[in-house]
Image: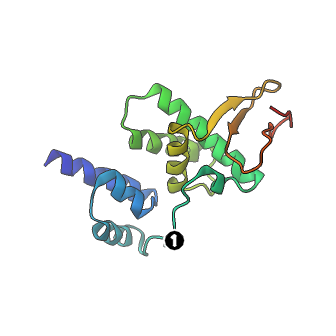
Amino acid sequence: MLKTFHQYSLALELLRRHARISIIHRETGLPRQLLRKTYRELHGRSPRPGALKYSTQGLTRNIKKYKEVTLFAVCFQAVESNSSESDIRKIVIAFDSYKKSLPSSDLDFSAAWVIAKDLRSRQIRLARCLKCKAAILLNARERDSERCEICKTSL
């Protein structure tokens, strides 16, 4: 019974953040049909259709998006190293912090989940520019050369 309460509570948190149904289902184990129905009840519309982007590279197609993804990665890394919460709760905390820092951002929770997954699996990683100390997200873009987007120093 307690586990079910936690599953529903987490599902509601994720639904309020407009997470993709596939992510909520994966994290809670709750039926997709129930999640879709609840999404419609909460938001007055059906959840967004379409495939989830499964890599950070698909989220960093331009400089603005790259910087937004990097900022979320910094928020997530701070939560990851300072919290004993579950993995999904860490993403929720980091996403909420990120949105407080940059409320105008188009980065959604589902994208944040993908970024966190890629950071954990080490497909991408955060580094600091040796010259200006800005955060740099390595392996997050399709191009071969990595450089700081602030001072343009090559790494």
Report x, y in % for residue 62.
Answer: 75, 55
Which residue extends farthest left?
Answer: 1
Q: Residues within 10 Å of mark 1 (few under 14, many from 20)?
A: few
Instruction: Note whether 28 is above or below 122 in the view shown.
Output: below
**In the image: residue 140, left or right of residue 11:** right
In the displayed structure image, the side of residue 47 where residue 35 appears, left or right: left
Q: How many marks?
A: 1
Q: Which residue is mark 1?
A: 50
Image location (x, y in percent) of residue 138: 69, 38
Tell me, yes or no, if residue 84 can be seen here. Answer: yes
Describe residue 45's horizontal placement relative to residue 53 as left or right.
left
Q: Residue at x 32, y 72 (%)?
A: 37
- Residue located 64% across and 57% down the image: 58
- The quarter holding residue 22 reads bottom left
Q: Nearer the viewer, residue 58 or 74?
A: 58
Task: Say whether residue 105 is visible.
Answer: no
* Secondary element at tag 1: loop
Q: Nearer the viewer, residue 41 or 26?
A: 26
90 to the left or right of 70? left
Q: Amino acid at mark 1?
A: Gly
Whole-percent x and y of residue 140?
Answer: 67, 45
Dividing the picture into quarters, in which one does residue 131 lie? top right
Residue 19 horizontal/vertical position (percent): 45, 58
- Can you say which quadrant of the picture contains the C terminus? top right
